[in-house]
Amino acid sequence: CKEAVWAAIGPCTNEPGKNVEPALAALRVLDDHLGGRKFFSGDTIGYVDLVAGWIPRWMAAVEEFAGTKLLDPQRFPSLHAWACNFLEVPIIKDNLAPQDKLVGRMKEYREIYLAKCACS
């Protein structure tokens, strides 16, 4: 999933947000797996929720950076609801990185990858 989301921001192109299909396919798998449950494990947060926990916060940064909506509530209702639920868990909510720092970091990473792509 992470590689698909990274492709959506266009690490080796000047067109971020153009190659979103792999990310959408990966998000579809997660949405289908949730099947309307509050968390991957049911009513309480579990291991899989923690493993997938980067998705809600980084996805918002990807959307802001690439100028495209990926975690759309109409397209992925279960995953969108899960993301909202996950971000409201107190220990998670109290320790989130600021959105502007994530977008800034994403820009830094992209510049590094663009430089590597130019050398390839």
Image (cartoon, grey):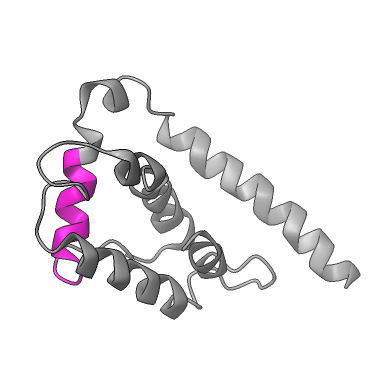
Q: Position of residue 16 (x, y in %)?
A: 54, 68
Q: Quadrant of the C terminus?
A: bottom right
> How many numbered discs sit on the rendered protein?
0
Residue depicted at x 13% and y 46%: 42
Q: Residue furthest right?
A: 119
Horizontal relation, residue 101 to residue 110: left or right: left
Residue depicted at x 38% and y 28%: 96
Asked if residue 27 is among those painted magenta in the image, a careful observer would answer no
Between 53 and 12, the one nearer to me in the picture: 53
Res 79 → quadrant: bottom left
Q: Position of residue 115 (x, y in %)?
A: 82, 60
Task: Give the residues in magenta.
Answer: 74-85
Horizontal relation, residue 5 to residue 13: left or right: left
Residue depicted at x 14% and y 69%: 74
Residue depicted at x 22% and y 36%: 45
Q: Main secondary structure of the magenta part?
A: helix
Location of residue 114 with respect to 18 vertically, above or below:
above
Q: Position of residue 54 (x, y in %)?
A: 41, 44
Horizontal relation, residue 74 to residue 94: left or right: left
Location of residue 120 with respect to 83 vertically, above or below:
below
Asked if residue 75 is among those painted magenta in the image, a careful observer would answer yes
